[in-house]
Image (cartoon, rainbow, N blue to C red):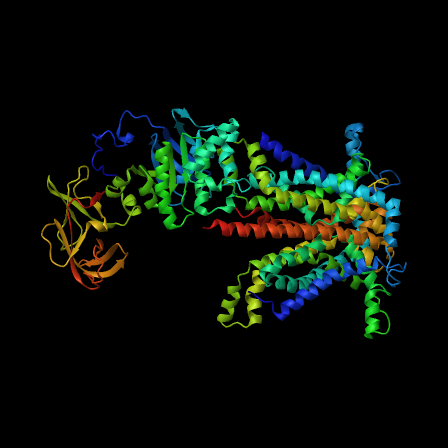
Amino acid sequence: MRKLSWFNLTSLTFGFAFLYLPMIVLVVYSFNSNKLVTVWAGFSTKWYGELFRNEAMMDAAWVTIRVALASSTLATVLGTLAAYVLVRGGRFHGRTLFSGMLYAPLVMPDVILGLSLLLLFIAIGLDRGLLTIILAHTTFSMAYVAVVVTSRLVAFDRSLEEAALDLGCTRFEAFRLVTLPIIAPAVISGWLLGFTLSLDDLVIASFTSGPSSTTLPIKIFSAVRLGVSPEINALSAILIGIVSVGVITASLISKRAIAKRIADENRATP
Amino acid sequence: MKRFALIALPYSWLLALFLVPFLIVFKISLSDTALAIPPYTPNLDLSAGWQGIKDFFAGLDVENFTFLTTDSLYWKAYLSSLKIAVTSTFLTLLVAYPIAYGMSRAPDEWRPTLMMLIILPFWTSFLIRVYSWKAILAQEGLLNQVLLALGVIDTPLTILNTNTAVYIGIIYTYLPFMVLPLYAALEKLDETLLEAAEDLGCTRMKAFWLVTLPLSKQGIIAGSFLVFIPVMGEFVIPTLLGGSDTLMIGKVLWEEFFSNRDWPVASAVAIILLLILIVPIVLFIKTEEKEWEGET
Amino acid sequence: MAVAPHKPRPNPNQNVFAPWDDPDAVPLIRFKNVSKRFGDFTAIDDLTLDIYEREFFALLGPSGCGKTTMMRMLAGFERATEGTITLGGQDMGGIPPNERPVNMMFQSYALFPHLSVWDNIAFGLKRDKLPKDKIEARVSEMLRLTRLEQFAKRKPHQISGGQRQRVALARALAKAPKLLLLDEPLGALDRKLREETQFELMDIQEKTGTTFVIVTHDQEEAMTVASRIAVMDHGKIIQVDTPARVYEQPSSVYVADFIGDVNLIEGVYTRPTPERGEIAYAEGEPPIAVDPVDGITIGTRVTYAIRPEKIRVSREEPDDRANRAFGKIIDIGYLGNTSTYHVELSTGQMVKAAMTNASRIARREFTWDDEVWLSWRETAGVVLAK
């Protein structure tokens, strides 16, 4: 078995401490009863109570969840389609433009995306609200879904689709019965990625939201712009908690699946 | 025909919601500010027929771009963004490399856990991760409390609302984007190559310079693009952690748009930023496309 | 140009399966002047070929010779650029893969990883909307045929490579296709399992009576399983014949060299008497005596191909063979069942001769640097004009 050298162990320890300490500090401070966040005055959960009584905050959370659900679902459909077209579609006119437009939002600064989408909505006379945020989020989440699905499709043995055709499937049946079940994990993680990106986005939502559709990040941003707020600490702690539980569960499931696979393969070789 | 429909759906979506918006930004950057809704002129009035189109084009000019060059605020902001983006990309690489290297050399059974630990912040809200540093870096924040208690310093340091805080924020939030491609490259590295280098007379350090580093080039390039390009237009980090003297073009654009309501100038700022970034963006897509779509 | 060996004689024994020798037999598959081009690259070049019902037909050639393209055209994944392919008299052009009575066993097996062995085999039957009990009966039959009954509920990754190969076969056979295509079916198996599986394949082919077309680059595999072999190179068929004829009467240097081990000796063909042919191959050596060949102009350069096992090695000069040559052993390749001797003739020519190691005793008859006689009959080799 390999052992870590001192150098590697040290860099990992410091690296992960750097990544996690700020979040841990945030969670700890969320239980501070003092209104001055950084001065400890005893354990309390009162900020959580205040948070749940804050109706504007709860409304924003509800808006955000609806936007995230709708945009990640739309983005998953479009992104999967785009990935399939790129990997299986062969050559077609404007392929370079297509892949360029598809992947550019991965790195394009949010301010540019947000500004350009807002100007589009105004030019076509679309009132800013839930719909405009959903359209905007779908456009950039699509890129992430496409990347995740593309790499799964590339790794996928093409003769599986041919076998389905050979055994009597139409192209659509082959996609539904063979391709989709096999790329499903990638499609699901693409959806989750789109969902979190949408939950997280401040800049694009600021440009494309209307007065009645304030999202949670916009609320958080305006609350913390000038200083720290105990209520936001509580909200952050909740969000960090949800993500941690989700990610840890997902990795445990995949770890178990891998272990099972290895066990199966050992059993298979006689 | 069916194939055409499959391509047409995502294609037209991207044309309508990605390409057309840029054309509109470009057009507005050539317009004039006006006290109207929307706050710019001219507007294309197709009902006026040919005359309308002629008026529309006659109303366009490059005045806003000239304005950007005359007011030193703008080019200083571009330069400062460039400097911050380059420096922080390099610093992030320095911090990320040992982590990625350590991960790639860790025992096999640790790796899924380490991977999960890198990915977890990636899924956690960006805004919250930036915000978390406010309580640490503030005058009366945790860092100063600890340093004062340890007797390292006598008076609290001013870090929050300076460029140092911006650098810390960028390194912190963009670290996973650098670690992941580096790890992907380093993990593929065959350890017998290092043994071979040592067998042929290299010291460990020399083997690192001559073998490990060149072979992780792909990861370094990908990671640097993933940090550099978005940081150029970063708005949240300089706004939350930077001070009044922190100049970044993303912040300028935001203020021009929301505070000054000067849409044509904001559009011109965006166009110039896009021109600066177009080369790195195209390079990034070209190199990564092969990786994603497989080299066929 | 190829030299016709003996004219295929109509077989007097009607029990032997040889429809290709029967002028009245109607082929199941006909390639007629088929060409396939991918851009500038010609994968198949004006190819004409008949394959008969119940045949086990092998397409043999190095990678890139066009054999896989031919198979993919039969399956319907590629369309011929020119020419027609008919199956049972019906033109196959434009018929999509899912509507052809043809099934394929893929090189990678292409088993659906998310379905059990049972569901993999039932996959094609379900597409035909067969009643449930029919499907169940057919799947059970296939499981029995391939001895997979106890693995029905397992997923593909839970079984061994050899079992996966059998699932792929069962799945392709389940729809009872008129034609089964096998793309390098045994390539992923290790040598021992491959040999066993070859016989199993032949057995199943015989039991089901299905026409099999196999693509392979392994000449031993083709020789073992096939009723006829088509040797391909650069999109063309070089020779189509039974394994024995391909081996013993290759039509060209390419085929002789591709199949098995061979000595190729270049010389000039002469015919001193109508009953006797000769090849002069070296100054100072007596010419090689051969059976006379019609159709070769006297005085042309030819290649004489002779298999190593047709040459005898002896210490004394033999007097019962028409051809003799004297030389020195340079190298010995010990293969267990046989030994190959590399003998350098006085002319400098290297000739390989193989001898069976019949006795187990370690005492070797010949060793390095021994001077030996090589001898062979006039019928042992083949004269090739190209």
Is residue A214 in view from this perspective? no
- Residue C5 placement (x, y as % from top left): 21, 38
Q: Is C40 left, or right, of B36 in this rendering? A: left
Residue A167 sits above or below residue B146 on the image: above
Which residue, as the protein is rendered here, is positioned at the far front?
C150
Nearer to us in this view, C126 or C54: C126
Number of numbered tags placed on the structure image: 0
Is residue A254 in view from this perspective? yes
Residue C96 sits above or below residue C365 on the image: above
Residue visible at 53% across and 61% down?
Answer: B190
Quarter of the image with the N terminus of chain A in it: bottom right
Residue visible at 63% across and 40% down?
Answer: A80
Q: Is B196 left, or right, of C272 in this rendering? A: right
Residue visible at 45% across and 47% down?
Answer: C161
Q: Is C94 left, or right, of C224 in this rendering? A: right
- Residue B34 placement (x, y as % from top left): 87, 41
Nearer to us in this view, A98 or A269: A269
Name the image quarter holding residue B85.
Answer: bottom right
Name the image quarter holding residue A68.
Answer: top right
Which residue, as the protein is rendered here, is positioned at the far right?
A35
- Residue C138 placement (x, y as % from top left): 46, 31
Q: Is A73 left, or right, of C243 in this rendering? A: right
Name the image quarter holding residue A65.
Answer: top right
Nearer to us in this view, C370 or B72: C370
- Residue B208 placement (x, y as % from top left): 57, 67
